[in-house]
Each structure stands twice: as structure tokens, then as C-alpha cells.
Image (cartoon, rainbow, N blue to C red):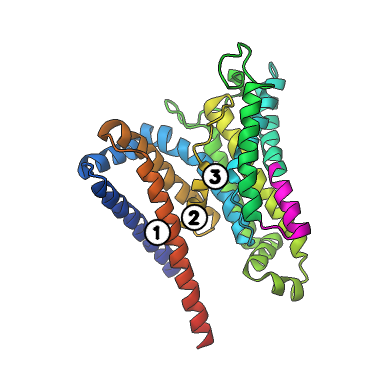
Amino acid sequence: MRIRAVLREVVTALALAGGILAMLALLLAAAGADVERAMSALAQGALGSPGTFASSTLVRATPLILTGLAVGLAFRTGIINIGADGQLLGGAAAAAAMGYALHGAPSIVAIPFILLAASGAGAFVALGPAILRQRFGVLEVITTIMMNFVVLYAVGFLVRGPLQEPTGIYPQSPALDAAFRLPFVVPGTRLHAGFVLAVVLAITLSWILRYTAAGFRVRVVGANPEAAHVASRINVGRLGMRVFLTSGALAGLAGGVEVTGVTLALYENLSPGYGFTAIAVALLGGLEPLGIAVSGIFFGGLAAGASAMQREAGVPAVLVSVLEAAVILGVTGSRAIWMRRRMAMGRA
């Protein structure tokens, strides 16, 4: 039965991936682009060679996996955390500030402190919406969206003020010490240890959700908070607060990994919308950590391929953003239909 279930999930995932690519081909045709040339550029940009796959696809997938885990964990508990992008930027700002403060320190000490600061900052950005949700019942959908703008403008202030590079010419922070860069894990590529960390976290989170009491409580609260409170005596509010902060910490870690693994500095447009793409990543991954990891790699490939499409076929990369929105609508719609059918079968 287990093998059949796995096979069914694999077939479903392949069908979804095929449907997404077919949708992209239709969008390209509607935009008047050379579909064959654009799709070829997409494939080359994402999978052209092992080096391209590691340097482009997997590097882009890393923040998507971490923010996807953040969004997916929150969704599993019924918390609609739309603020992963702001939490990521908060983590990136904390990483840049901590890296600047630790200038000259040994990398074995500095890198863990930088990543811890990034996770703490992400949790701090999530703290306000979490308290408002817990104490006053304010919808986290609204507060987390607003926090995205607050953090975005705060980063703009930092890179033009306290964290601006010494010459004061560019709106960005000073570059971190080269020793603070995350080590590369594949020689000759840009793939850094942040990808390994993201995969390990996905595996760990999957194990926690499946085999521990804490994971059981998260699943029960996500399925039915009232039943969890009455039947299982779970403190739903306290659990929700912990999950909310953990979700923010994961997104903040994504910002720290991006700074220490790719940019080595903080600037305003550091995130091209990773936190929003993470919603599609989490939904396509079925809110399961391992599914989210696979989905993150898929979207990383789309992002890498989109750049190649724009460069080699003249196709606007924004088409991929349209595709991501279509994926969210398609996946949420299909899940709603599936849930309605299950409820109807239960009543029959």
C-alpha cells in the first residue's frame, strides 16, 4: 500500500510538472514568442550541464526551499504567514550587521553567529503579527503583508544610513569578509553549503512532523484546532505562537544564507520575491517538507531558465511570475475541489 501511495504521489507530481510546462508553452505562444527557442533556452538555463544545474538551479532553489518550509510549516498549523519575504529581508539585514560587527573574527565562529542572528531577526519580524493574532485575533494575512513593507523600507533606510558602505556612494552595506562566505560544496560551481543546510532542515522537519509528539500536535491543530483543544488538551494558542516564530526563523535563515552564500552584502532588492514564490513552492509541495524541497528545486530551475529565456530568446522573465501565480490558483483550486469531494464522501 505504501509503494502504491508513493507511486501515486510521483505520478501526480510529474503530471503537475508537465501541466506547468504546458501552461508555460501556452503563455509563450500567447505572447508571440518562439516557443521552441524559448523552451530550449529554459531547459539549457536550468539543466544545461551539471555545473549549470548546481550553480544556477540549486543556488536559486536554496532560499526557496527555506522560505517554502517556513510558509508550509505555518500553513500546516492553520497560520497564513504571507510575510516570509519581510522575514527573509530582516534576516539578511541582521546577517549583514552581525558580519560587519564580527569583522576579523575566525569564520568558524562568525558564520554560526551570523546565521543565528538571521534566524532571530526573522522570528522577531514575525513576533508582532504573532502577538496580534494570539492576543487580539488580528488576521495574520494582513499584518504579515504589512510587515513586508515595514521591513523593506527599514532595509532601505539601513543601506542609506547606519549600514551603508564606507564610501557612501552605493545604497548597500559593506561587503562581508571573504572568510564569512559559506563554503562551496561542489568544486568549480557556486553551490554553497546553504543548500545542504536547507535539505537537512527539510529532512529533519519531515521526521519531526511524522514521528514526534510535537509533530503530532502540529498536525492535529492544523486539522482541527477545536478538537485538538478539547480532545487532546493541546494549548492551541501557545503552539500557534511557537510555530509562527519558528516559521519566521526559517525565513530569516534564508536571508542569512543568501547574504553569506551569494551576495556577501545587503542591498534593497536582495529578494526578488522569494517569500511570495515560497507560497507556490509550499502548495506545490503539498505542505510536506520533502515535497517542498523538490518543489523548491523545480522553481529554482524555472527561475534559472527564465533568466536564460530573457537573455537568449528575448522573452520577458515576468512570464514565469505569471506562471507562478497560475500555479497557486491551480493548486489551491484543485485542493479545494479534493477537500469538498472528501467531505461529500464522508457525509454519504
At label 2, counting other C-alpha atoms closer than 10 Å, the crowd grade (few under 14, some 14-19, many 20 or more) is: many
The answer to whether 129 appears left or right of 285 in the picture is right
Q: How far across and how far down the image is residue 208, in percent? A: 64, 56
Task: State if disc 1 and disc 2 touch (CB < 8 Å).
Answer: yes
Is the residue marked by circle 1 packed among few (<14), some (14-19), or many (20+) residues within 10 Å? some
Residue 28 in the image: above or below residue 190: below
Taking the spot 73% from the left edge, 47% from the top edge, the residue there is: 127
Which of the two residues, 148 or 303, is positioned nearer the viewer here?
148
Of helix, strand and loop, which mostly describes the magenta segment? Answer: helix
Is residue 179 visible in the rendered image? The answer is yes
Position of residue 169 measured from the top left corner of the image (x, y, whole percent): 57, 14
- Of pointers 3 and 2, the one earlier in the residue sequence: 3
Give the distance between the C-alpha atoms of the residues marked 2 and 1, in whole angstroms.
9 Å
Q: Secondary structure at mark 2?
A: helix
| Magenta-highlighted residues | 125-139
Q: Is residue 138 left or right of residue 313?
A: right
Q: Which disc is residue 275 wearing?
A: 3
Say what secondary structure mark 1 lies in.
helix
